[in-house]
Structure formats: C-alpha cells, structure tokens
Image (cartoon, grey):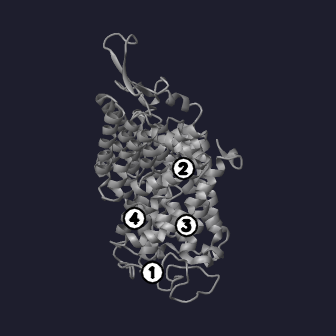
Amino acid sequence: MTSATVLSGQLAGPVLAVYQQDPKAVGGSLGWSALVSVIPLAVVLLSLGVLRVRAQWAALAGLVAALAVAIVGFAMPFGMSLLAAAHGAFFGLFPIMWIVVNALWVFNMTVATGHFDVLRRSFGTLSSDRRTQAILVAFCFGALLEALAGFGAPVAISSVMLMALGFRPLRAAVLALVANTAPVAFGAMGVPVITLAQVTGLPLHDVASMVGRQTPFLALFVPLVLVFLVDGRRGVREAWVPAVVSGVVFAIVQFVTSNYISVPLTDILAALLSAIAVVVVARAMPHAPWAARRTGAEAEPEAGGGSLVGAGGPDSSGEGTGGSGRGGPRPTGGPVPAESSPEGGEAVATVRSGARVDDPREIRRAYAPYVIIVLVFALVQLPGIKPAVDKLKLAFHWPGLDVVAANGKPSSTTQYSLTWLSTAGTLMLIAGVIVAAVLGIGAAEAVRIWGRTVADLKWAILTVAAVLALAYVMNASAQTTAIGLLIAGAGGALAFLSPILGWFGVAVTGSDTSANALFGSLQVTAANSAGLPPELLAGANSSGGVLGKMLSPQNLTIAVAAVKLDGQEGVLLRKVVGWSLGMLLLLAILIYLQSTPVLGWMLP
C-alpha cells in the first residue's frame, strides 16, 4: 500500500522520509486509482476545450488538481509533492524554455534587421506557379519557422506570406495549418521529443529515432495534399514532381538527422534541403508548368503599394475542395500563376512595377543565420569535441525528493541531469551571438531583443513550467502508472490507439510538448504492461500529436487572426478536420504494423 516510510542510516543526521509508490492507492483498486488520476488531465482539457480558459491558467488549475490527488488520493507527503512540482517546473525552464527563448531570439534578430523579410521575398521569387508556391512557403518555409520559432509562428507567418502571393485568406490559412504537421515533433529545436524523453525516462536517441521512423511518412503525403488543395486532381497530375521531391527529401533528411546526426537540427536541415531540392529540379525542368519563375521585380509590392483583392472577407467559393470553382476550366499544361486561379475568382496580388529587389549580399545574409546554426551544432558533434562537452554536465538527486517504485527500487523521477554546454539552448545562444555579429547588431541591441523575447514568452514560460510540474507530480505519485496499467488491458490494440491519444492531447492543448508531458509516461507504462516496445508508444504519442495541431483552438485562432477572418474558426475547422483524421488513420495503421512482425523491423 502507498506509504511514506521512515529510513535512517544512509545519511548521518536527520531521518529521511521515503515515499513508496502504489498504483492501487485509492481503495486498493487499480480502477478507482486510475479514475481519480484522470482528474488533473480532465481539469486541463475541460478548461481549455470547454471553458476556453487561457492555457496558463488551465495548466495551473491542472497542477493544483494533481497536487490534491497526490496528497489526498495517493498519500504523498505535502512537502514532497511540492518538491516534485518544483522539479518539473525547473525542467520546464531548463532546458525546455531555455531552448525556445534562444531559438526565438535568433528569429527575432532577423526580424529586427529586416533580413526575415529578405528571406521571405527570396522564397517568393522561386516560383510563380501557385502549386509550387504552396509547397515552398507552407511546407518548406513553414517547417523552417517551426524549427526555430514554433508556438503558432509557422501558421501565422506562412498564411500571411501566401496571401501576399495572391492566395485567398481562407485557402492560405488551410494550407498553413495542413502543412504544419510533419515538422511539429522536432519543432523548436527538438523540444517536444526532448520533453518526451525526460518524462518517460527513455534515452533521447531511442525516442527521437522512433519518431523519426513515423513522421517522415506524413511528410510524403503533405506536399501532395497541398497541391490538391490548391488545384485539385489536375494539380496533382501536373505538379506531382515538386510535391514528391519535397516530400521524399524532407522524409529522408528527417529520418537520417533524427536517427544519426542531431535531434535539434532535424527540421532545419529537412526544411532547407527539401526547398533546395525543389529549386534544383525546377531549374533542371525549366519548361515544366510548375517550374515557372517570377522575377525579383514581380515578387512583391512595396509596403502599402499593393492590395489583396477580397482579402478582407470569408471565402465562399468552396475552398479546400480542390474543385475547378466558378471560373470555368483552365487549359491543361500551363502554370497556375498569382494572377489566375483554378477557382477563377481567387484573390490576386496587385503588383506595382516599382517592387523591391534585394541585393544578393543581403539575401546571403538572410540565409546566414540558418547556416551558422547548422555549423555550430555540427561542430559539437565532432568526435574530438562531443565527448568533452558532454562531460560538462549538471546532474544531481533533487533535494528532498525521495521516491521508490512499488517494487522498492529508486524511482527515476527524482533525478535531474543537464549537459549545460551541449544542450540546444546554449548552442542556440552561441549561434545567436555569431548571428548578431553577422547581421550587424550591437551587443546592447542584441541583449534588448533577448529581453523582449523573454517578455513576449512570459505566458508560454508559465504554461510550460506548470504543465511539466503537473506531469512530474503525476509521475512521482504513481498517478500515470495507475492510468497506464489500466489502459494496458487493450493489449495489442494499444499500438493502434496510442497515436490517437497523442492526437487528442494536442488537439486540446495545442502543443505537442504539452501532450508529451501529460501522456508520455502513461504511454510507456501501458507499453511495458502490454508487452509492447515502450519507445514505440512514446513515439506514437508525439507522432499522432502532430496531426492534432491543425484542429487545436489556439492554432485555429492564430490562423484566422493572421488572415483577418475573425469568427471563422468553425469554417476553418471544417476545412481541415477531414485531412487530420485521414492522416491519423494512416499513421495509426502504420504504428500498429510496427508493433507486429510485418513492420517490426523498423524499430530502432
């Protein structure tokens, strides 16, 4: 039975209270214990999904519920439950938000100097074909934004860029949401999988390798879906080459990087190389309709110099269906330029002849931050350097948190470890210093931008700290163990259901990181009890979660705000829900087959 026993003799001085976990603490019943353990999760999900409470307050409410269940239901000492929460909150700050802050700092410096706009215009000049633009902007550039900024930035920025290229607002939002799937698990320099590894106690390499053998299959489909959304079956027939090239290259690079190179670099390399691959193939096939280019002078109107016809109202032309629309058929075999549309009435960008053309040197400087990041991370991976920096580790037993599992063995939930120099956050800080010098930003201005970044992220910092605190309390008190043991009764079907749980978590919380923190340990406990590989179900939680992001209220709100379609969240939800469920079904089948001899060879 759950107990706080008293042990002495291991350390001289005061007597130490040790808490022993018991997944059947409530009435000696696993069922009742699991049911009570669901309360903190229900508080978070209902607060977000039904009461529409802001994320930080929902997370804090869930934390309070988790503490109450731990203390009252599982007899965890009050002080020890608070220590478990402090342990989780500290991990939420270092390394999780340490990574996010420094990654977003680099991004904000490019915005402050105008080099982000240069990069955006550079992407806009790569093609005048609407289908190729959707791939390059929504899929490739959106993945690059996900790699660095995350937290809604890819959807907001990609949708605005697509509107500037002539897409109608609703279509731009749909494309941005659907594209923001494959890169999510490795977004923000790998924060979701790093969090997943920490809360489950599994090695980061095992977790990242498993996710890297699941999400690449989504990358194969997403570009084709984008082309279909833009131009229907005709688009797939005419522009399948760039869709397949970008998807295959992204999938291969995502797999190789996550398994063998560097988890934080996964999305950066996949995004850049997939975009480069499309451009290279387009140059090799200059007469293909989808390869048509727009010149720099045609790329974009000057600020305030152009207008988006119809950009202020909702789309009423049946967007997202891929049909030919109101304008009648278009001759097959030609590009779909910004001035024409498969729908005939699609909004177009009115471009003035005095459009801005960027200096090639500024274009190179716009790409420089991403090259610098790759080089800094690659340098740390060199055989002569990696062992040395990995030794610089902060590792200790969390003071006062003495927890043993039901079998009497010490629980892994009491340990804290951080390789402080080689962690992605510190490497991003180093890269950021170099980026500031390259972009001509002085030290004082760089520090000011860093401070503003922290201030902008204050609520995100509170949310992540509260969610991780909640997760650590549930793990330390055996609440997640109770739930995991109960759902393990699903047996082999658990592999099919596992990504659906992750999908549900992200659909409600809007964050793959939060869903991994809430359900990651639960998935591993269930896997161990059901005789399934723990890394398979842990990875499935994150992989399934990426498909729930396009349905989350937070992302829908960001999308409609970006394209100025306030109040149209329901319309947008109906446009994307089918794609989310369809790809979720395919992913669930894949993961189930990975749990069987059919695809079991895919496991790391």
Upstream in the sequence, badge 3 or badge 4? 3
The residue drawn where x is 50% and y is 79% is 338
Q: What element carries label 2?
A: helix
Residue 289 location (% of width, % of height): 62, 77
Q: Mark 4 points at which residue?
A: 556
- Packing grade of label 1 (10 A; few <14, some 14-19, many >=20) is many
Mark 3 to mark 1: distance in Å? 18 Å
Residue 78 seen: yes
Q: Is residue 319 above or below residue 508?
A: below
- For the point 46% across and 62% down, the residue is 550
Asked if residue 447 shows in the view, the reply is no
User: Which residue does the numbered mark 3 point to in the structure image?
Assistant: 135
**Label 1 sits on what residue type?**
Val
Q: In which quarter of the image is residue 384?
A: top right
- Residue at point 43%, 57% (across, down): 507
Q: Distance between the residues labelled 1 and 2?
A: 43 Å
Q: Are marks 3 and 1 in contact (CB under 8 Å)?
A: no
Q: In this view, does 29 lie to the left or right of 237?
A: left
| Mark whose residue sits in front, 1 or 2 | 2
User: In the rendered picture of this protein, how many numbered marks are placed on residues?
Assistant: 4
Image location of residue 151, percent across then percent down: 40, 54
**Residue 498, labelled with which disc?**
2
Q: Quadrant of the C terminus?
A: top right
Circle number at residue 389: none
Rendered location of residue 243, percent (x, y): 61, 66
